[in-house]
Structure formats: structure tokens, C-alpha cells
Image (cartoon, coloured by chain):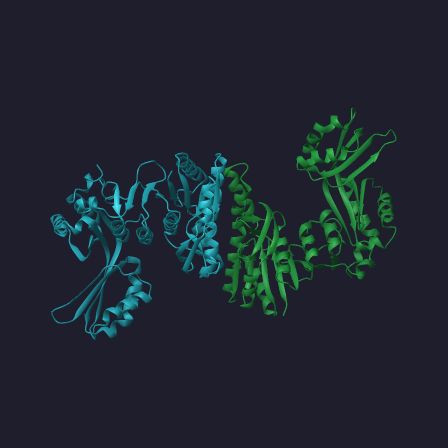
Chain colours: A cyan, B green
Amino acid sequence: MALIVQKYGGSSVGTIDRIRNVARRLIETQQGGNQVVAVVSAMSGMTDKLIALAHEVMDNPPESEMDVLLATGEQQSIALLSMAITDMGYKAKSFTGAQAGIRTYGSHTRGRIDDIDASRVTQALDDGYIVICAGFQGVARDGRIHTLGRGGSDLSAIAMAAAVKADLCQIYTDVDGVYTCDPRVVKDACKIPVLSYEEMLEMASSGSKVMQARSVEFAKKFGVVFEVRNSMNNNPGTIVQEENTAMESLAVRGVSIERNQARVTVSGITAPVAYTAMILTALAKAEINVDMIVANTAHDGKARQSFTMNMSDLGAAQAALKSVLPQLGPNAKLETEAGLAKLSVVGVGMRSHSGVAATVFQSLADAGIATGMIATSEIRITTTVDAADIEQAARVVHAAFHLDQVSA
Amino acid sequence: MALIVQKYGGSSVGTIDRIRNVARRLIETQQGGNQVVAVVSAMSGMTDKLIALAHEVMDNPPESEMDVLLATGEQQSIALLSMAITDMGYKAKSFTGAQAGIRTYGSHTRGRIDDIDASRVTQALDDGYIVICAGFQGVARDGRIHTLGRGGSDLSAIAMAAAVKADLCQIYTDVDGVYTCDPRVVKDACKIPVLSYEEMLEMASSGSKVMQARSVEFAKKFGVVFEVRNSMNNNPGTIVQEENTAMESLAVRGVSIERNQARVTVSGITAPVAYTAMILTALAKAEINVDMIVANTAHDGKARQSFTMNMSDLGAAQAALKSVLPQLGPNAKLETEAGLAKLSVVGVGMRSHSGVAATVFQSLADAGIATGMIATSEIRITTTVDAADIEQAARVVHAAFHLDQVSA
């Protein structure tokens, strides 16, 4: 008998029919001889509706009360899903985040999971119930409700899997798993059967929208093996687990792309070395997430720094940097470029295979695609290209590493 | 400085504008130098919407999960009301039933309040917050959510008032208070300034829809003085408190009417004395609330019993009694009469004033109104009349006791 945690997102429980579909899947899993915990999100659209209601009251509602309001979304889902299972003749019991013992810390609307006292959940499993747990929420030490922010339900599922020592955590979504590239862009992209946590992390942070990085980090930290799979079919998904030697046989596992990127360059910097901190502090104060950072010094001794960021942040970044520009140098200048995209290749095999970068840039050059900023980690190479070139870039790099033959 | 608990029902928080109105009232109360706890219901219509959603899933949803679902209604109200107060520049903190320490026992969907650990609420009051507490809900010892059934928010408010030792509990509703009779029926009906718990109880159980009897009982048990008043104006309401001698100066305080009544009579009973238990058990099993019971023995030694009940229960009562009829006697017969109404006069002064019953029946006889079954308590006289006669009956009895001159 295995213990399986299954997470269902908002679209998987978006209608009563879909809730019934999830109920059937949970029952099948239990009938297969397993103990089952479901972690569910609010019905799709519900969270937006509640946010709109709050904004009817005021522009900037206090986050502690937003949490109280938003937590009702998942609470409705767990009750309805539990009813659907009961209706099919099986035992189910719902748990809010607080009832499931999910203890949080940090700020409202972006709480972090501290620990989970899963004793009530474990008792219900031992009593033969299918346990239905509200994702995205927990309770702080002062008894207030916390929600966990974007991707919070994935985090709830993985943390619950760690707490109950689940054999497997299945993250159900509307895609079959993690692909070698976005199949809408690269037609012969393949589902990747197994990935390491590090690869999943690099893909998450380089544009693959399947999961938030912090959920993957949590899984890595607690050794939770999880599988990303489709709630509408029974296809095997992508399993994410600790790295093993077999994974190194391939230099590159996947290609991620991220659109809507912009670059900001500050040049003519003559200020002393503190200038990087000065620039990054100004951007952080404006709540802008900077992604790639490239710095160098020109032959005239003046420094220049470039950053990429989401295009929607460009205006705010420009405004924030304008105010510190005079402190950077008498002739310091700001240059911006929108309309960029990012291409990343990811794979743990990169560590032991040489020539990966050469293959990436050669294939792009052969296709006549100019590259811009470049950044690398141990298992990732990222370059910016013109937004207009990103799809072709993805296809030629995908082909150069024969990624269409992965999951044979 | 006084501590005031104010309860606002679903229609008082039914729209964002009305929520703002309630926020203003709470702030005014606090600015008047008081500590304030608001107990609120779900926005009107919300509970029905959630029930409909549950019934989309299944016909007979488990009550434990109905509680989880329905409790989200008040949870949304408390968050929105708290936001509205914050928006106006004042401090508010919301509490679900569980967070407010409302501990319950009994069954799901009709839980009973066990006790309240109000320490968190008291702390928040001491910290200068307006406390917003979800009515209608609490938490059982096993950590499950209980809702309190019909009128549950009134009960929450009165129990909270007892727990925090409030100076006053104000039950805000859409009427100005308790009237000597329904003003839609008797045009010169007056608002009653002060009532005893017993009078309020008799009026509640004889058709006056202002409050459920169990909330009044709870208030009586814990000596909570409460006031029924209108959330849309600032008129003083009806204060309900311990009986005092001044209240006895009037023989009759009010006239209640209840429509949609039916009578069932079982005649020809020859069974031994256990027959009453047999009949009432059959009706209880069918979940029929019997109201008046009149029993006597005819000169032929055969017994007959009559009951009143809500007209909607008549079919079920007939079916339930048919099955026990053969055991009551070989010629036992069932008779039913629908289309009845009940008229009650209530007043603690009845104990010391004689001739109240005579005045009731004389005034009805003078108006040519036939009376049917009669039942009395120490402070109430009830009679059935034809439904067609009930309004005229109310008017003539109201006039006979000069109730239009009460609150001069």
C-alpha cells in the first residue's frame, strides 16, 4: 500500500463536472490499494472574483483580511469535492489549511510553510477516508489565516507529502508533463520522463510555467519525489527527483523560452565600486525583479551594466534608475531595449559534456539569429534574442541537441 | 466605557454599500467611547447560492461538509466588513467562529454553543480594534466546523455578549423592534420599548419572526440584556431583559399571529393510555413539529386527540399516523383541517390580571369569529381561527387591550 498526495489546480476543479472527474480519480487511486490525500485549489475564476469584491470595498485592502477572504475559495472546493466522493459511495473528509495542521510564518498573502502537524490527516487516512485538503493556505502562530501566494497549492501538496511521508506526490495540471520545449513552439517537443530537481528549478526560473521554483526547492530540500501530470487523461507524466548518474547521459534535457523581456543598460559609470549596489537597491525599492545581470568595464575605464527584466517593469525601472543616475557619473546614460526574449538550455549533463555552449551558438549563428546578453549556471546557458526570432531559435537549438528523440 | 456587541444579519451586509453602512455604524459606536464587537451573517443570498452549489453535486450532501461550505459565507462577510472599516481609517480585525473561540457540540448544521474562549477577542478589543466575528459558526472539539442552524447568528451574538461580559447586545435587523402586533396587519401596532425574556420567548414561539426562541433562552440563562433594532435608522428598539414588577402593570404586551396552520384529529381511540406516546412517536419519526396538543375523552369512553402543525407538514403527518391507526382502536379515525391560523396574546401581567381570557374570547365573539383549539401557558393564550379571519381577529384583540397606546 502506497500513500499518494495528488494536487489538483483551479481548472481541474473549475466546474461541478470536473470536480466529479477528480472525485473519480481519487477513488480509483484508493481502490488501487493506496491511501490518498488530495490538495486542491479554488475553482478557477473564484480567486479573481473575490479579489474584485475586495476592490469594490477599497483600493488597497489589508493583506491579513485578503487572506481571510481568499481562503474561502479553497474551503468551498474541499467541501464540494468531499461531497462528490461521498455521493459516489466513498468516505471523504475535508480539511482547511489550519485543520490540516499547515503552520505558516512570514507575511500575509505570501506566507511560507513552517511545518505541518499532520496527525489529524494521518488519523483520517488510517480511518479509511480520502483526505481533501485546502491548498494555498495555512495558519500562523497567532491563529490568523495565511495564504501562500502564487503557486501556493503546489507548495501545500509537496509540504503535505513530506509531512505524511508520501511515496509519491502527483501535481495534476492541464499538460501531460514537462516538455523538452513548449509544444506550441516546437512541434516535435517530447515529454521528459524524468528530471532532477536542479533541472526543474532551472526550467522553472527560465520560463517554463509548469511550477514555481519555491515548490521545487521545497521538494528538493525534503526529498519529495513528485510527478507533473494531466488531470484529464491517464498518461504518465514527468517525474522530478534527486539527480542520478543516468541523467547525465544527455547534455541537454530541455529548452525554455521566455517572452516579453526587456534590457536596461547603464553606461558611463565612473562612481566607485558601490555602484552595483546603488543600482540594484534602486530597482529593488521599485519592486522590480531583475533577471540576468551583465557587467563589464570599457577600455576607457568606465563601467557599464545591463539587466533583463519583464517588459512590464521597464517603465518603472527607467524611472527608478533616473533618480540615481547623477550619482553614478557625470555622463552616466540609460539605454533601454524592449522586444526581447530569452532562450535557455538546461541539463545536468552539461557538467560532464563539453561543447554545449558551442553547439547552442553555432546553431543560432547558422540560422542567422543574433544573440545578445549571455548568462550561464552550471547546468544552464541563457541568451537573449530578438522576440521575433525566439520561435525559430527554439527550434534550431532543440534540433541541434536531438531533443525530439528523448522519450522514445 | 461600555462594551457593546452588535449583530448584523444578511440583509444588513447584503451589498458593498450596506457593508459600508454597517462599518460607519460600528465606527460611530466606537467613537462614542465604547468597545465594539460585530457579529455578522453571510451576505443575503450567499447561503442559498452555496446550498444550490452543493445540490448540484448531490441531493443529500453530508452535513459535516455542508458546514465547511456554508461557513465560507460569513468568512467572506467578516473580511469585507473589516476592509470597509480599514478603508475609513479605523482598526478592525476579523475572526472566524473558530478564531473567536466559539466552541460547539451537537450535530453538524445545527450545532449548539458549548462555551466561548474570548481571550483573543478581548485582546483585540484592548488593542483598540473593532472586532468582526463570523456569526452562525463555531468549532467542535474534534476541530471540525459547526454551523448553528437557523437564527444561529443571533445566538453567536448573545453568546459572545455573555463571554465578553458586554454591557449590551444589539440585534440589528430590518424592523425597528418588537411590535404589539405585525404592523402590516394591525396599522396602529406600536413598538414595545421593553419586554421580559419570557414574553419574548412566547412571542417567538407563537409566530413573531423577530428572533428564534433558543437565542432568547440563551440570553435569559446568562442574563444578557439585548435590544432588537433597525440597522437602517437610529430609532431606539425593543430592549429584552429580566422581568421586573413594572412589566406587570399591563395584562397583555402583544398579539402574535401565525398563518399556514393545520389541525389533525385522531378520534375513536380505544387503545390503553400509551396512545399519546404512540402518536407523538410516529410524528417525531417523520420529523414533524407538533405545536398545540388538545386531548379529551368523549362520553362513549373513546379518546380523541388534536394537534396543530405547519400546513406543509400535513401530508407527512397523515401518512405517519395512518400506519399506527390500527393500533389505536378498531374504529380509530383521522380527520384533518387545513386553512387555519393561530392567534396568541402574551404578557407577564396575565399572572396578576384576571379576565384576560374572557376579554380575548368576548372580543372575538363580538366580531363573529369562531375559535377552534385553545391552549394556554402562564403568560400566553392561544386559539386557532379560520385563516380568513386571522387579520380581523388580530385587530379586534389588539384594540380590546388598547395596545395602540403602549409606547406613548
Q: Which is more toward the observer, B166 or A181?
A: B166
Q: Is residue A55 among what the camera can see?
A: no
Which of the 4 image quadrants contains residue A176? top left
Q: Identify the image quadrant of the C terminus of chain B.
A: bottom right
As rendered, which of B390 and A204 lies closer to the eye? A204
Quarter of the rendering containing residue B192: bottom right
Q: x and y percent of residue B341 in the render?
A: 75, 41
- Out of A279 and A381, give the one closest to the viewer: A381
Q: Quadrant of residue B321?
A: top right
Q: Is residue A165 above or below residue A269?
A: above
Q: Residue at x 54, y 62 (%)?
A: B120
Q: Residue A183 location, x and y as percent? A: 25, 42
Question: Is residue A46 at least partly visible in the picture?
Answer: yes
Above or below A195: residue B18: below
Residue drawn at the location 21% of the way across and 51% of the way down = A344
Q: Count the marks.
A: 0
Give the image location of residue B395, x and y in percent: 79, 48
Quadrant of the image containing the N terminus of chain B: bottom right
Position of residue A131 measured from the top left corner of the image (x, y, whole percent) = 45, 43
